[in-house]
Image (spheres, rainbow, N blue to C red):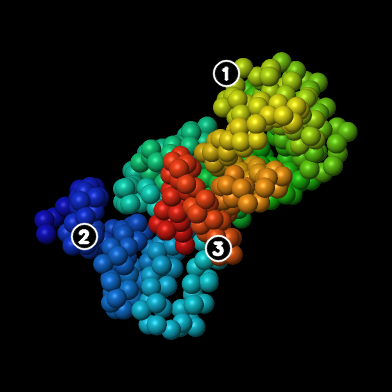
Amino acid sequence: MKNYNINNLIYFVNSSFKNNSYNLTLKLLEELIKLDKTSYKAYCLLGYIIFIKSENNIEKLKQAIKYFDISIKIQKYYPLSYYYRIKSKKKLIKINGEEVPTIKEEIKSDIAQLKKLANNYLIKNLIKNFLKNPLCCQNKKKLILKNIEEIKAYMIKFNNQKVKYDYFDIIENYNYFIETNNNMEYDLYNLRGFIKFNLNIYDEALEDFNISISKYPYGYYNRAKLKYKLKKYDEALKDFKEAKKIFMRESSSSVVDRIKCDHYIAWCNYELNNRDIVFDDIEVDYKDDSLAYYNIAKLKLQFKKYDEAYKYFSKIDENCKNYKKVKHYIPVCKYKINNNYDDIDFLENILKLISIYKEENDFGSVNDICYKILEHIERFDKKSFNYHYYKALALYHIYEIGSYNKKLKKQLVDSLKSVLIMIKDKKREYYIIKKIFTDLQIYGI
């Protein structure tokens, strides 16, 4: 083997893997880990290739598991190492022909850890990126994402499979800058905390936000969002109010920062049942702002005041960043107001909202909307195609944005089978259902 440097080896590993030259890939990976013993992705890829080539060889499966063990030891938050270790251990049990109690317990432990780290949707996207470009990496000394907006834009790209890195590369990137920067750049703690927040690593995200708060005002805002996510609405409300005070003092902050705080204060008051003051800030102070219109409309929807929600949604122009959602919320409001809107058109608009919220990683909204679909279709004939079709789609989205749930998966598969029996000549619906089945077979835990 030639004396390649690390970057060359990574390039050749990715190329040989894409060409299915697995034996060459294994040799290159062995060279790579001699040079870089901290490459958790290299160990994960070694384990993955041995796993897919193992057939019924118990020793090879054990070797694959050993590499996943090393990968996890280096980077305990990398979900794919847990995911493929679970698959390897399940295959080991299947070959043995009997359940091995210790391995069964280890699988349960790995599934529990996987549930903490990411939902099925994020894991699926990680797998897709891993198989396209397994050793994607970057120069740690070059800061990739410099602000929250860049991270948000990156997340949408990641979910659409148009990215070079993954979340864990970026965490490593921030780790390097925090460890090597003697000037304590507090915004880096905030950025790292934001990524960890989106990966459900809440305890460490909170630590980062607590550090950033001492110097960086956005720390309060993001800590408040974390507490809101954890349903600690009283604590979130205090932090949003503190963030608002700082934004009003800081000349560098924009009006939008203060508006966002006002809107979250309104949502906290809604969750705390302080309903008489929910609209105080956003209606009085920012009547002409499209962001305010959007949040007022969403809150009116929660109160089931559909005519008022429609009025505010209709005021929002296409320059608003939420306009994609507004286009689908307007017909939803019309349906609710008139109750004579086409049922299927209503549900199709709801499904489009789900797609947008998934791109934004707003899984709470996806979950709420899915349960509204299940509630809505109760009016349908239980033997009808539309009842089974929309029930299957709602269950699929609930399963995908959640963690592995064996009972829910069985319920989903049964529902999908019922749809396939009834689908007949509906080509579009058949394609959608078959794609869901494929997703479950390839990416289901």
> Hey, what amino acid is under mark 3?
Lys
Q: Is residue 281 left or right of residue 81?
A: right
Residue 409, x across and y down, in percent = 54, 60
> Hey, what amino acid is under mark 2?
Tyr
In front: mark 2 or mark 3? 3
Mark 1 neighbour class, 10 Å CA radius: few under 14, some 14 to 19, many 20 or more = few
Query: Residue placed at 80% from the left, 35% from the top?
Result: 303
Residue marked by disc 3 = 410
Q: Secondary structure at mark 2?
A: helix
Q: Is residue 64 left or right of residue 176?
A: left
Residue marked by disc 2 = 22
Q: Secondary structure at mark 3?
A: helix
> Hey, what amino acid is under mark 1?
Asn
Residue marked by disc 1 = 319
Q: Secondary structure at mark 1?
A: loop
Quadrant hosting residue 373: top right
Query: Residue placed at 24% from the left, 53% from the top?
Result: 17
* Of residues 234 and 398, the one drawn nearer to the viewer in this rendering: 398
What residue occupies the far left of the structure in this picture?
2
Residue 208, x across and y down, in percent = 58, 48
Vertical arrangement, residue 382 with respect to residue 334, above or below: below
Residue 322 in view here: no
Disc on the earlier residue, 1 or 2:
2
Q: CA distance from mark 2 to mark 3?
A: 34 Å
Vertical arrangement, residue 193 with respect to residue 308, above or below: below
Q: CA distance from mark 1 to mark 2?
A: 49 Å
Q: Is residue 212 left or right of residue 313?
A: left
